Image (cartoon, rainbow, N blue to C red):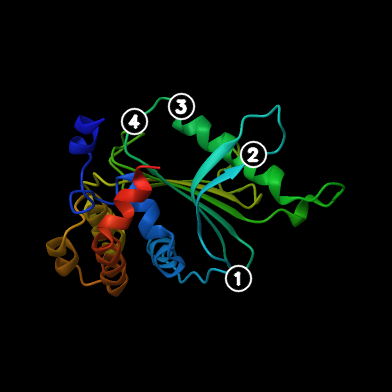
Amino acid sequence: MEKSKKNTPSLQELNLVDRFLFDEVMEDSSTHRDVLSIILGRDISLLNESETEKEVRISSLARSIRLDVFAIDENQDVYDTEMQKVRKPDLAKRSRYYQGIIDTGILSPGVLDYNLLNNTYIILIMTFDLFGYGKYCYTFKPVCQEVPECILKDGATRLFLNTRVKNEAEGSAELVEFLHYVENTTDQAAQHSNSERIHRIHKRVKEVRQNEPANKKSRGK
């Protein structure tokens, strides 16, 4: 037990790719809003408080899921933001399962109009390129194979972000800076950025790190 305590990294050593720091930082709804706004390239106004480690269950027989950060905006759009540090072979299908469970929990029993389903965004921030095309972001929406310009407007969007982005010129400079910052969550990285959102995110990171004793206690639970 003593050895385990010694091997536990301090908050000063963690980056946002580490789930504990990620969850602690993202519990602040204004910070989660800034992160979503950077990723989606538009201002997001969250309606409710962000929930971390939200467990979603639909029955005692079905497998439950635990969402890293869950929130709903003023348009009733639903956001699940996941941090994925370890490459696993089932991530694509896991995102499909998460989508299904979230959808099942949205509609009340007896509702017949499926148009009442909220728009949903499942966002995975990963420390690797899952698909191998060198993109900083892979956005998936259902498209007709026979008619590529025909998009199935079912309101579901899944995004896979790659913090190891190489082709920085192809996307938003703010998003690229954020993805680098996620892996290297330091004062220097934040100061190097021109993004006010990233500066605010780092301010929240420093607040969490300053609360190190309390956070150490909570990690031991």
In the rendered image, residue 200, in percent from the top left (x then y), is placed at 30, 71
- Amino acid carrying mark 4 in the image: Arg
Image quarter (top left, top right, bottom left or bottom right) of the N terminus:
top left
Name the residue at the left extreme: 188
Q: Earlier in the sequence, mark 3 or mark 2?
A: 3
**Whole-number angstrom distance, CA of label 1 to CA of label 3:** 32 Å
**Whole-number angstrom distance, CA of label 2 to CA of label 4:** 22 Å
Disc 3 is placed on an element classified as loop
Specify whether residue 83 is in view: yes
In the rendered image of this protein, does residue 191 appear above or below residue 129? below
Q: Residue at image x 66%, y 49%?
A: 154
- Amino acid carrying mark 3 in the image: Asp
- Amino acid carrying mark 2 in the image: Gly
Residue under circle 1? Answer: 74
Q: Residue at image x 34%, y 30%?
A: 87
Q: Earlier in the sequence, mark 1 or mark 2?
A: 1
Answer with left or right where residue 3 lies relative to residue 33. Answer: left
- Amino acid carrying mark 1 in the image: Glu
Residue under circle 3? Answer: 90
